Image (cartoon, helix red, strand yellow):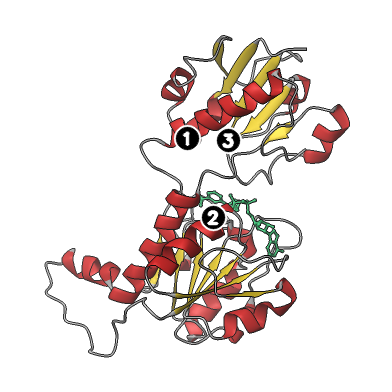
Amino acid sequence: PQLERLCVHESVSTKIPVEAFAEAFAELDVPVDIVDDDEAFDRTDAVASFRPRDAFLDAGWVHCIRAGYDEFDTAAYETEGVPLTNSTGIHDTTVGEIAVGYMVSLARMLHIYRDHQNENHWFEPEYERPFTVENERLCVVGLGTLGRGIAQRADALGMDVVGVRRSDESVPGVAELYHPDDLHEAIADARFVAIAVPHTPETEGMFSTPEFETMRDDAYLINVARGPIADEDALIDALDVGEIAGAGLDVFETEPLPADNPLWDFEEVIISPHRGSATNRYHLDIADLVMEIFDQYQAGEDLRNRVA
Ligand code: NAD
């Protein structure tokens, strides 16, 4: 059946303003309802949500507004024959800029200067400490939307960009590709290592003690993907003993990051609150994608970003 309604689940408020998001569908020729956990669905309903709910399996199509859909039970969608789509493909600029922001700050010490500014303190660092990102090696692990967004921007800054990818097809801005089996070789010489793979059984704990030992002592880990891909206890240990120099982290095993987590206290760790994709027009980017897939559904075409 055709879709007769678009339901915006209130959980989208985790990342975007619900009302503004619903209003962004003014051009859609079906009504848009903001729904909560009491709502029931049928096959004429489309649902856009941040969080999964069992009741969504009664809908005609479900869109996860996140790129990472690891919380959704894809097998259940396949069993029910309900298409599930995600929001990959729209975070290259937003998350790419955050990753570049961490790297430039870590290299030029902006985060340290701000720490001292908080104390009205004119801080002059050791001569050896600041460096340019230009000519430094960045290894991007995973070259989908995020990875390409990071690689392209790092390349524009004159960085020496290498990447880890399952296929050997070349990627713009990436000088050299390594297979995931050669992860250690790929990260051994890098000053920055950026994680941009999804969280899957295969990638969980992909970075742990052996990887931190392999990385340079003066290397920085950038994680903008998902917390569990880098084992947090191992990361804290590696930072403690100086196996790596620091990190830029947007994602954590537990979010919000608990106040007593040791990661907060490292001078060379920059923490952002899983807002790598946050901008004042994020809701419009997602709405454009949802409308594109909505039209494909109504036309009986293959759905962009279908994950189940
Ligand atoms: P994407 O699907 O466009 O890209 C993921 C890439 O990783 C694909 O090219 C895939 O082939 C590759 N990959 C998967 N497993 C791999 C492995 N074992 N080794 C090497 N490569 C592997 O997704 P995306 O939009 O780039 O997002 C990636 C992840 O980043 C999401 O799953 C999500 O968890 C996270 N994310 C975080 C934010 C944020 O706000 N911080 C925003 C968007 C996405």
Is the CB–ligand 1 distance for label 2 below 8 Å?
yes
Residue sitting nearer the eye, 204 or 147:
147
The quadrant the C terminus occupies is: top right
Report helix, strand or loop for mark 2: helix
Circle 1 residue: 285
Q: Say which residue appears at 50% left-offset and 64% top-offset.
A: 151
Q: Tell me the tag on residue 263.
A: none
* Amino acid beneath label 3: Ile
Give the image location of residue 31, x and y in percent.
Answer: 56, 9
The quadrant the N terminus occupies is: top right
Q: Tell me the tag on residue 146.
A: 2
Circle 3 residue: 65
Q: Say which residue appears at 56% left-offset and 32% top-offset.
A: 289
Measure how far apart labels 1 and 2 are at the Cα level.
15 Å
Give the image location of residue 32, x and y in percent.
Answer: 55, 13
The image quarter containing residue 119 is: bottom left
| Tag in front: 2 or 3 | 2
Report helix, strand or loop for mark 1: helix
Report helix, strand or loop for mark 3: loop
Residue sitting nearer the eye, 223 or 169:
169
Look at the numbered discs 1 and 2 and tell me whether their residues touch, using CB distance below 8 Å: no
Measure how far apart labels 1 and 3 are at the Cα level.
10 Å
